[in-house]
Image (cartoon, rainbow, N blue to C red):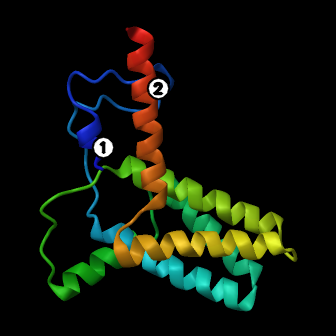
Amino acid sequence: MRLSLLLNETTPVPAALRGTMPDPTVQRRGVDPRGPRFGALVTAFVLAVVLATLWWPLLAVQAVVFASGAAGRSPYAPAWKTLRSRLGLAAPSELEDPRPLRFAQVVGLAFAVVGLLGVGTPVFTVAVAGALAAAFLNGAFGLCLGCELYLTYLKTSLTLTRRSTV
C-alpha cells in the first residue's frame, strides 16, 4: 500500500508524527523504486557472505550502510544511477515516498546492531539471517518488510488519532 493512499488533504497527521513528517499535501521528491531494490540485492549478497563466513567486520560495514540509508544517503544510489544510465533504462513512471524506505533502513540497522552485540552466539546468526531474508524479499520480489511496518504503524496511528478526535 502506498503512503499516498493513506494520506490526503483531509487526513490529519498524528501529533506524535508532526515534528518528523512534512505536510503530506506538499509535493516531495521521490525515489526511483528500482534503486532500493538494487540496493537490497547488494545488501542480500553482503549479508549472505556474512552468514557464510561469520565475519562480523563485514556486518559492521553493512551497519554503516544501513545508517547512511536511514539518513537518506544510500551509498548504493550512485552505483544504481550509473547502472541505470549504462543500461539505458528510462526514468521511472512513478516515484516512491522515501520515508518508508528510510524506516526500513533503521530496521536493518537494528538487526545489524543486534547481530554485532551477539557475535559468537546464535543471536548473531539469527539477526543476520533475519536481515538477509528481508533484503532478499525486497530485492527479488519488491516486498519491503520495513516499509510495510512503517505503513502499518502510520495507518494505526491515523486510526487512533481519528478515534480520539471523535
Which residue is drawn at the image coordinates 15% and 79% (left, top)? 89
Disc 2 element? loop
Picture coordinates of residue 83, whole percent (x, y): 28, 83
Residue 19 has which mark? 2
* Above or below, 80 relative to 31: below
For residue 74, what is the image quadrant? bottom left
* Above or below, 124 relative to 26: below
Q: Amino acid at mark 1?
A: Leu
Q: Earlier in the sequence, mark 2 or mark 1?
A: 1
Picture coordinates of residue 123, whole percent (x, y): 80, 69
Picture coordinates of residue 76, whole percent (x, y): 43, 73
Disc 1 element? helix
Q: Amino acid at mark 2?
A: Gly
Label 1: few (<14), some (14–19) or many (≥20) C-alpha neighbours in 10 Å: some
Which residue is drawn at the image coordinates 35% and 31% (left, top)? 22
Q: Which residue is mark 1?
A: 3
Residue 78 visible from this viewpoint: no
